Image (spheres, rainbow, N blue to C red):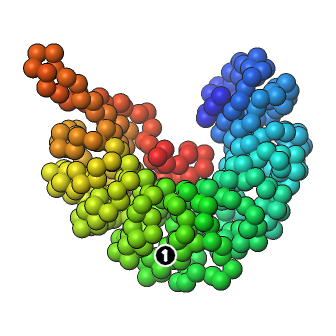
Amino acid sequence: MTIRSIPTAANGSKPDMLFVATVAKCIELCENLVSFTCTAHALLPFILTKLLSQKPRLTEVKLEALTLSVTEATELAKMEGLTHLTLESPSRGALHLLEKWVGNNRGQLTCLSLSNSIDVTPGLLGYSLAHLSNLKSLSITNCLATTHKDLLRQLNQYPQLSLESLALTIYTSTREADALWPDLFSLKHLTIHVRQCGKEDLNPTVKSVLSCVSHAALESLTLRDIDRAELHTSVLNTVIKEHKRTLRKLNFVSFILTEGQIREICLELKELRQLAVFITVYPDVLAAYISKAKRLTTLVDTQSGTGHAARDPSLDSRGVKKLFKKCVGLRTVKTTGRTYTAEWKESGKTGEKELKVTLHRLRQPFVVLREGRDGTWDL
């Protein structure tokens, strides 16, 4: 069950109580509820008792905990048997009870995500890591008190963890890897968000973080910068050299790649299934590169989701159709608010395959500017 927004009363200051009562009744009836997401924080106080009662199969919880009081957080912390816990914009009350939440689910919790908080400290993170021996996925993003340096140092203290997925935010520059950083050899998925880093320090900092996964069989890598930036060739060469045999998803958000870099990616990454880039070349040229990636099925144009003005050339429906025709293995192309899907069908008359392109329009873009409440990349 997912609740992302709720209607308000006539005065606009309180939730519509009829809607609240309906949601509470639905939750009460869903005895086999497995997953629950609520990013409408005003609703939580009204549904806590329903959410906590008779839900033996509930294992995944994602909440925007901006206004949770200590009392409400205490009630939520009684949950047991959780495998996935996500807290977006958690209040101090919610974080105060995080230790109890972790303690009640220490044997089952495999995924922990905390975002948009100034109160997530290295000490609090360290306590959680010490008690979550089965943790496989960790995401600490937009938490100012815990830099990527702090996060990696904490992970180094718990080598028994076999993380498979990690998301972090860069706030400070690091030109070289820290001796206290771990070797994340078990990692398969890495997401790096760059929020504050000088242009001269950007690429060395990214390379320093990538050094932690130099021995990992990385399957997906996402690099995202708050500002539009050029990707240095040395960073791309590092990615290709160390992960060319395993990388299946490569996503660059707000990073501008040259034609040569796109061509290099398509030629060298033999296992690549998905590529997300800021497309700055014409469809005919792009198709020549994409056709080299024999296993590529999904292409994402990130330019329209970065908040920057539209550029020429733009990837419109005609350009997408050209890509599908020249790259027969390509099945999906995503732009902001639109997803194109290709299907090749045999003609009943000639027996030749004909291209059918389906367009699905989304109410909201697939990528947003603000993380947290509105979500992140759907990649």
185 displayed left or right of 77: left
Number of other residues with Cα within 10 Å of mark 1, as a class: few under 14, some 14 to 19, many 20 or more: some
Taking the spot 63% from the left edge, 31% from the top edge, the residue there is 2
Pinpoint residue 234: horizontal percent, then vertical percent. Answer: 38, 77
Q: Is residue 210 at all visible to an observer of this figure? A: yes
Q: In terms of image quadrants, where is residue 346?
A: top left
Q: Looking at the image, how many numbered discs can be counted on the residues?
A: 1
Residue at position x 33%, y 39% from top?
332
Position above or below: 201 against 330 = below
- The picture quadrant where one finds residue 269 is bottom left
Residue at the far front in the pictured view: 245
The answer to which of 299 and 1 lies nearer the viewer is 299
Q: In the shown orientation, is residue 346 left or right of residue 45?
A: left
Q: What element carries label 1?
A: helix
In depth, the one of 153 and 94 nearer the eye is 153
Coordinates of residue 125 in the picture (x, y in percent) = 77, 63
According to the picture, the residue beneath numbered tag 1 turns out to be: 207
Which residue is at 60% across, 66% downward?
185
Amino acid under disc 1:
Lys
